[in-house]
Image (cartoon, helix red, strand yellow):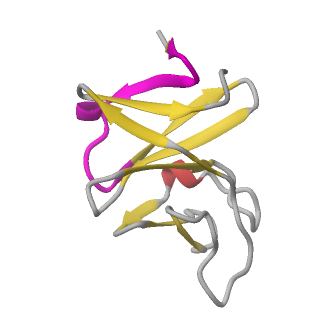
Amino acid sequence: MTTVTDEWVKVAEVADIPPLSGRVVRTKSGDIALFHAGDGNFYAIDNRCPHKGGPLSEGIVHDCHVTCPLHNWVLNLKTGEAEAPDEGKVATYEVKVKDGAVYLKLGGA
């Protein structure tokens, strides 16, 4: 069950997402990809690659990037921007970790 705390929504326990992996978070406005990056932090971006809509949550996580599983586009998890030579961007979402849980800021969703 999802718990709403002010504008922050609890979406996972830290222990549920191993380092260098991702998962999908389903919201009313679309799917969000949540990642446990190589720097130990959690990041969230839209789950659709700007190239052909590939599911980024199923991509390979390396450092603070994810490689789309369809056509190998690399996106920066901090900025949502595609790495050169590719061009494009996905939305990013604020993430916080508190008491072993991961929260997304979804505008009061």
Q: Is residue 16 left or right of residue 96?
A: left
- Position of residue 54 relative to residue 97, above or below, is below
Q: Residue at x 71, y 66 (%)?
A: 89
The answer to whether residue 29 is left or right of residue 6 is right
* View extreme (front): residue: 6
Q: Nearer the viewer, residue 96 or 89?
A: 96
Left or right: 14 with respect to 33? Answer: left
Q: Is residue 8 magenta?
A: yes
Measured as percent of width and height from the top left, residue 92 is found at 61, 52
Q: Relative to 97, say whether 90 is above or below.
A: below
Locate the C terminus by quadrant: top right
Q: Residue at x 35, y 57 (%)?
A: 37
Whether residue 25 is situated above or below residue 70 in the rendered picture? above
Q: Identify the residue at image location x=62%, y=51%.
A: 55
- The image shows residue 71 at horizontal and vertical percentages of 63, 72
Where residue 91 sits: x, y (%)? Answer: 68, 53
**Residue shown at 29% from the left, 32% from the top:** 16
Tag count in the figure?
A: 0
Task: Confirm whether the magenta stretch covers residue 96.
Answer: no
Q: Is residue 54 above or below residue 102?
A: below
- Percent position of residue 108, x then y: 65, 21
Hey, which residue is sitting farthest bottom in the picture? 85
Magenta span of residues: 4-21
